[in-house]
Amino acid sequence: MPLDSVPRDFDTIAPAYDATRDPIDPATLGEVGRVLREQQVRRLLEVGVGTGRVAVPLGERGFQVTGVDASRGMLAQARNKGLVRLVRGSAYRLPFASGSVDASLLVHVLHLLDEPVVALREATRVGRFGAFALVRPGPGEGERRTPEQEAARRVVYRILAERGYPLPGSARGGPPLKERAVLAQVPPDRLTVVSDRMVTEPVARRLDMLARGASRHTMHIPPEELQRAVEAARAEVGDRTVTFRRVEALALWSAESLAAPPSGSVAT
């Protein structure tokens, strides 16, 4: 995907973003804050701050958070929440001096990046204690996506493909797999589990994002075709629920660990 297409996509979906994503778990954020404080982090740069879903609660926990994002639309939503330390910029070339904050933080952003290692090197340049990323490390027992977990979206994708709208392969891999590929390519200095919990949700819950046109993978599908596929999926999955394990961890990289390409690295 071209590097400039991601911010344009997020400009479009920004107004519906918060309403169509899972809320940030307060206990997980509390653990993130605990780990950051243990590392003497107070001044934080959140790379890919988005709508401020993480920056706001971290600010309430006493951190001085500056946010950077390439999407004007997402930054506008963050400003509406009262965030003022916001800068538009690229993760690949952060508009900040070296060592200007205690640490950088990326929250489920690595899967969006065409060049995640470049972004991590920039993040460690700016953060004097390194760069942290909230990731789904897996694969732990029961933590992989189950067929039921993805049933509704698979129905939508199948119907769209039958009607001449096949989706790219990136729509099928999922963010966790891409995050794990980055962890394998550049192993972090430290990986601290901050959340390990069982989650139960309606199978159809994952259709809400599609129905509101807030998925980057289906945003270019004609609305009437998308709505037909979504309604067909709702009818097929009904009111079933799925229970799955969600593990999240805070990875830490130092500038030294990212100084040179690791031996045997593979492209993401």
Image (tube, rainbow, N blue to C red):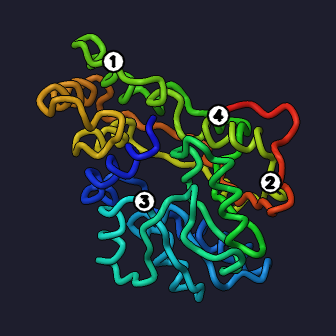
Mark 1 or 3, nearer chain start: 3
- Give the residue type that dot 3 points to: Ala
Residue for badge 1:
166
Q: Nearer the viewer, residue 167 or 147?
A: 167
Regarding mark 3 in the picture, which secondary structure is present there? loop
Regarding mark 2 in the picture, which secondary structure is present there? helix
Mark 2 or 1, nearer chain start: 1
Mark 4 or 3, nearer chain start: 3
Measure the C-alpha gap from mark 2 to mark 1: 37 Å
- The residue that appears at 52% across and 83% down in the rendered structure is 59
Provide residue 38's location: percent of width, then percent of height.
79, 79
Provide residue 78's location: percent of width, then percent of height.
36, 72
* 33 vs 140: above or below: below
> Mark 4 Cα within 10 Å, few/some/many (few <14, many 20+)?
some
* 268 vs 163: above or below: below
Mark 4 or 2, nearer chain start: 2
**Is disc 2 in contact with disc 1, using a CB cutoff of under 8 Å?**
no
> Mark 3 Cα within 10 Å, few/some/many (few <14, many 20+)?
many
- Give the residue type that dot 4 points to: Thr
> Mark 2 Cα within 10 Å, few/some/many (few <14, many 20+)?
many
> For residue 98, which quarter of the picture?
bottom right
Regarding mark 1 in the picture, which secondary structure is present there? loop
Residue at the far left in the pictured view: 224
Q: 168 left or right of 236?
A: right
Measure the C-alpha gap from mark 1 to mark 3: 28 Å
